[in-house]
Image: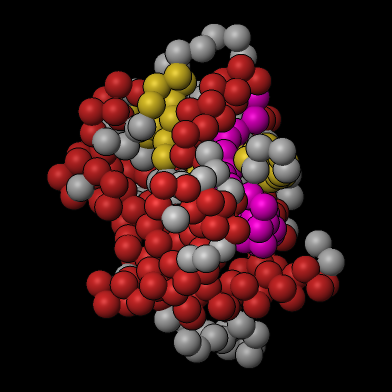
Amino acid sequence: MSVCGAARCRWIQTRSAVSLLQQNRTVRRHSTGAPESNVIREKLQAFPGGSIDLQKRQESGIAVLTVNNPARMNAFSGCMMLELEQRVCELETWTEGKAVVVKGAAGNFCSGSDLNAVRAIANPQDGMRMCEFMQNTLTRLLRLPLISMALVEGRALGGGAELTTACDFRLMTSDGVIQFVHKHMGLVPGWGGAARLVGIVGSQNALKLLSGAVKLDPDCGRQMGLVDEVLHCSSGEAETLAHAEQWLGPFIKGPAPVIQAIKKVVVSGRELPLEQALKTERNVFGTVWGGPANLQALALKPKHK
Ligand SMILES: CCC(=O)SCCNC(=O)CCNC(=O)[C@H](O)C(C)(C)COP(=O)(O)OP(=O)(O)OC[C@H]1O[C@@H](n2cnc3c(N)ncnc32)[C@H](O)[C@@H]1OP(=O)(O)O
């Protein structure tokens, strides 16, 4: 990414954090004086491997974000965590976009954080820094003005299961498994997955999934409300992705500014206290009222002229 792009990323990150939840007013600093986020960035940089690939399809307005580290079942290396932040940043400024599909490479979703990296930074301070970094990135992913979907083929384990909860929808292939394996690792979710899971399935179900480290198959996932659709397709990744894009079809029909506005009012309704959510809704309404799509729709209703 260019320096300009990186600066814009930081600006957007700051702006969205301030405008939406008014969090992080002060930059926490390490004893060296460097911002905490830079301390963990340097540490994560030391763990290479894999990539986070982004393909933006201008014609459909759908982006495909791929967690790509098949030799380690798509586990997140440190560099991949940093790359995810960059990719999310690119999506934040994609004004023509409507949706993003998050998937794993080579028929698996993601096996969480790379256990080699975890081992090397296995102290509470670095653990908390890494979690804060991933929480920020996944919160930004969930707040994108794009409709997001986790497409779970194969396994979504640990941090991989948490990643699925940072999307608006979850689709699973019939061989898919979502498992919050943290308990088996002597851990709890730390990338915001527990908080989001409670929001999606309720505290009773979340407690069962986390304390039982339940291997959730697609049908149980649907019953619990974690999974929105099960895809029964057998001809490989491309066909599965095509099915997922087809599923998104009705929700992304229409102009990008309207789809993005819809997502924005849902995010504010989901996250903000009512008064603030209502204010945001008015502001977002103002961006589409009298806009091209609105005027075009009015022109198609001659009876009401
Ligand atoms: C945020 C907190 C977290 O995410 S904690 C991490 C949670 N994740 C885990 O505990 C998953 C650990 N992995 C496993 O249990 C198994 O590897 C799973 C994914 C079930 C696959 O088993 P199986 O089909 O037998 O393959 P395998 O074990 O031989 O794995 C293939 C190669 O991939 C690697 N791998 C897998 N997961 C990770 C991981 N999270 N970090 C680092 N490496 C991972 C395995 O080590 C194995 O590599 P290699 O072929 O032995 O070099």
Choose top left, top right, bottom left or bottom right for residue 3.
bottom right
Q: Is residue 31 above or below residue 49?
A: below
Is residue 117 among the parts visible in the rendering?
A: no
Instruction: Return the residue found at the far right.
Output: 2
Q: Position of residue 195 (x, y in %)?
A: 31, 57
Instruction: Return the residue found at the far top.
Output: 234
**Count of residue discs:** 0
**Residues in magenta, as a range:** 84-111
Choose top left, top right, bottom left or bottom right for residue 56.
top right
Q: Position of residue 211 (x, y in %)?
A: 23, 42
Residue sitting at 54 percent across and 22 percent down? 243
| Front-lying residue, 33 or 261 | 261
| Front-lying residue, 19 or 281 | 281
| Front-lying residue, 22 or 195 | 22
Q: Position of residue 63 (x, y in %)?
A: 65, 42
Choose top left, top right, bottom left or bottom right for residue 14.
bottom right
In this picture, residue 81 sits left or right of residue 183: right
